[in-house]
Structure formats: C-alpha cells, structure tokens
Image: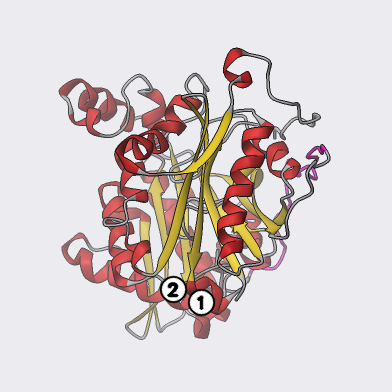
C-alpha cells in the first residue's frame, strides 16, 4: 500500500510556465471545451499508471445535449490557464435530487484535474465555491463526475499500479492540494483485492454462507441471459434503485441516465459474470462484475483509447491484450431491502467468482465500498480480500476563505495488509 507522500504544499514552480499570469474562467466556446476535455491526457502524459479517458468520452460527459444528467441538474465548467497553457479544470454542479435527499443547501464538484500548482488549485476550488455560493448553497461535496453513478473520489492510498476499470487514478500530490484548499474528508471509498482460488471456491465461512443461501428451496440462481439482455438489465435497474435508495449521496437514476450508463458498459459485459437471485420466481438480488479491460488498455498504452482502437492495428493489439486480462471488478452488488437477511450476496459472489475462474481470472477487486458499510466490507474480508486502495470524497463549507490558507499535509491512517475472515457463516445482504 502506497500512501500519498506527506510533504508541505509548495508554492508554484519558478518555471516560465508557472510564473505566467494565472486566469480561471468559465468554459465558453469550442476551444475551451476542447482544452477542458483534453486536459487529463496532456497534463498527465508520462505517468506510468494513469489511463487518461478518451477525448470522446470526456466530450460526451460535459455535453449538455448528450449527458442525461443535464435533464435534472445544472453545472458550470471552469478552466485555469497560465498564459495560454491550460493547467487545471473543475466542474461545479447542482442536483435537485441530491438536495432533496441529502443536503438542501449542498452542491457538488468534480472533474478536477490540476498541475502541481497550489495557486491554480486554490483558484479553481474558489471558482467552483463562488458559483455554488451565488446560488445560495452552503457546502460542496466531491469529486464526482456529476453524481455517485460516475467515477468519484480522490485516490489517497494505493499508488502502486494502474486503476481497475471505471475507477479513478490521480497523482500522489492531489490529496495535499485538496487539504491546502480548505477541503476536509467526507467519506472514504475502499477497494479490496480478492484472490480467486483454484476452482473459484470461496474460503470456508463464505462458502458455508453461500451454500446456506443457495440451498433454500425457494431460491434460484442464474446468470444473465444474452437472449433477454434488455429485460435482465431492466431487472438490474429496478433492484439497484431499491438497494441504493438510502446510500450515501446516492440519487435515483432517470431512465435515460441508466440507459446511457448501460450503453457504455454493454461492450464489456460478460453474461457469466452477472448473476441474479430469484425468490419464488421474482428477481431480488444481483451481482455485476466486469473484466478489467484496463489491463488491456494499459498493455496498449501507445494506442490511445477511443476511435483509434477501431483502426486495424489498434483492434489487433487490443484483442491480443484482452486475452491476457486476468482480473475482474465487482462494480455492483445489491439486494432488495426485504431479502437482505437471506445471505443471497454470498451465494451470488460465489457463483460469479467460479465463473471468473473459468474465464481465467486470478483475482477480483471489490470496489468501491463505503468505509462505514460494515456488511459490504465483511463480505470482502470473508472472500479473502486485502484492503489495497482508498479513495476519498471531500467536503468544503462555502463561507469565504481567508486570503492566505495555511499549508497542510495529508497523513491518512495506514491500511492493514490483511484482514482475517469473520467466523460466522452467515452475513446479511449488502449494498455498496
């Protein structure tokens, strides 16, 4: 486990670029939009673990006509430049669903990217805070894409390898920038590395819990049926809405938001890795795993993701790399509230893990799990998981900041290298 190195936050470098005048302005026009979308790739070029998003994906995310978030929320994008060079970006957002369910005076921020430039970072956070304050809001939470259904959190521990599919990665200096800009921890999101044993069989306590649940006479387990893909995805949506209704910062997805998300995931879905539990014929729980295609993308780093993968050379290199993928990510597992005492999560995870073994996976990642979600983290431990990454959501009050903020450092609590599995054979239903 590699934590972000503790260091005083430095002032901007004395390089010619850092000494150029700094300006932070709202994104306006095609040139600004292109610079905002391209910044992650240009800013972190050369990082051995960073897998920057495709420009097309970034453009779709911020396009008010294509991203269905903008049917229910609003946002402002800001770009920081030193001279003519983009050095940072941020988005501020208002989601009425989040305000109704969690914080009536709360706003959101996300899409933060910045050079190791404390002045630029402070100006970006101040711009986002000012925009939200103008709308009568008192706090902001993030980073989120635009909601918890997008990539969210800042990596604060576990910088020793590339991220798994749909998980964010950032340089180790980011946490210090956040704390120096007056943001404080709101919630940690945990990632567990789980080995896939021979045969895919889980350890003893988890195996006993899985058998106990699966052997119930009214329970049937099945994997996703490719012939009824749309119907099964509708089942995922229904259970997801029920299972996440009370989750931290969670908001209900609109039909268009869910369809938009599934359209992105559809090319990655393996039916053998998506499992449902039915009770008396009614679907009541699911687990949704994806092969970690980031392994393939990392192996073909010189071929940019996006359209270039459609070219013959890109297709060939990626196809070869995909065959070497040996890790899966557990992105969702949910049980309807009325059935959480039946241990169905253990049975579903066991079946998916057996399928992952047959597909050649040596390990999986359970991510992300809220740090205070005791049941979810117990499942990760019961399946032999080792806590190996921590992402963090931050919060900031929107009162005006003092002219000079004190420097600070980030020293997160160290994670254990191993956690013993619980002795009890039965653990309750789980949410993320």
> Mark 1 highlights which residue?
245
Question: Does 429 lie within the magenta span?
Answer: no
Give x and y (percent) for residue 106: 61, 68
Pointer 1 with pointer 2, Cβ within 8 A: yes
Quarter assignment of residue 316: top left
Say which residue appears at 22% left-offset and 63% top-offset.
229
The quarter in which the C terminus is drawn is bottom right
Mark number, residue 122 = none
Which segment is the magenta one? 407-425
Give x and y (percent) for residue 397: 71, 60
Q: In this view, does 133 lie to the left or right of 324?
A: right
Q: Distance between the residues labelled 1 and 2?
A: 7 Å
Q: Nearer the viewer, residue 380 or 212?
A: 380
Badge 2 density bin: few <14, some 14–19, many ≥20, Cα 10 Å: some
Give x and y (percent) for residue 364: 50, 45
Give x and y (percent) for residue 249: 57, 67
> Mark 2 highlights which residue?
252
The quarter in which the N terminus is drawn is top right
- Judged by depth in the image, the label closer to the viewer, 1 or 2, is 2
Say which residue appears at 28% left-offset and 34% top-offset.
306
Quarter assignment of residue 288: bottom left
């Amino acid at each position: 486990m590699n934590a972000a190195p503790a260091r005083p936050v430095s002032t901007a470098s004395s390089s010619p670029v850092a000494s150029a005048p700094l300006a932070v302005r709202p994104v306006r026009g095609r040139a600004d939009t292109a610079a905002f979308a391209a910044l992650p790739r240009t800013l972190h070029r050369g990082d051995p673990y960073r897998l920057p998003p495709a420009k097309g994906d970034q453009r779709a995310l911020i396009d008010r006509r294509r991203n269905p978030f903008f049917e229910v929320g609003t946002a402002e994008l800001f770009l920081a430049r030193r001279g003519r060079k983009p050095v940072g970006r941020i988005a501020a957002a208002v989601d009425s669903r989040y305000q109704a369910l969690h914080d009536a005076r709360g706003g959101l921020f996300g899409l933060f990217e910045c050079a190791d430039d404390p002045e630029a970072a402070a100006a970006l956070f101040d711009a986002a805070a000012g925009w939200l304050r103008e709308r009568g809001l008192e706090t902001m939470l993030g980073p989120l894409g635009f909601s918890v259904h997008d990539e969210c959190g800042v990596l604060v521990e576990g910088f020793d390898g590339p991220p798994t599919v749909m998980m964010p990665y950032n340089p180790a200096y980011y946490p210090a920038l956040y704390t120096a800009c007056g943001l404080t921890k709101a919630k940690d999101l945990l990632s567990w590395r789980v080995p896939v044993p021979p045969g895919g069989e889980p350890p003893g306590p988890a195996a006993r819990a899985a058998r106990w649940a699966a052997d119930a006479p009214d329970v049937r387990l099945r994997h996703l049926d490719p012939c009824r893909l749309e119907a099964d995805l509708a089942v995922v949506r229904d259970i997801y809405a029920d299972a996440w209704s009370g989750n931290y910062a969670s908001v209900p997805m609109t039909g268009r938001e869910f369809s938009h998300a599934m359209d992105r995931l559809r090319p990655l879905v393996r039916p053998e890795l998506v499992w449902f539990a039915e009770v008396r014929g009614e679907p009541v729980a699911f687990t949704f795993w994806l092969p970690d295609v980031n392994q393939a993308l990392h192996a073909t780093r010189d071929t940019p993701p996006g359209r270039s993968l459609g070219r013959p050379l890109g297709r060939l290199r990626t196809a070869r790399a995909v065959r070497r993928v040996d890790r899966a990510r557990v992105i969702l597992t949910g049980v309807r509230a009325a059935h959480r005492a039946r241990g169905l999560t253990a049975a579903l995870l066991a079946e998916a893990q057996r399928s992952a073994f047959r597909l050649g996976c040596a390990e999986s990642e359970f991510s992300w799990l809220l740090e205070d979600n005791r049941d979810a983290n117990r499942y990760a431990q019961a399946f032999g998981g080792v806590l190996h990454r921590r992402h963090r959501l931050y919060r900031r009050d929107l009162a005006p900041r003092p002219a000079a903020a004190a420097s600070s450092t980030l020293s997160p609590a160290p994670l254990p290298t191993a956690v013993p599995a619980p002795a009890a054979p039965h653990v309750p239903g789980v949410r993320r």
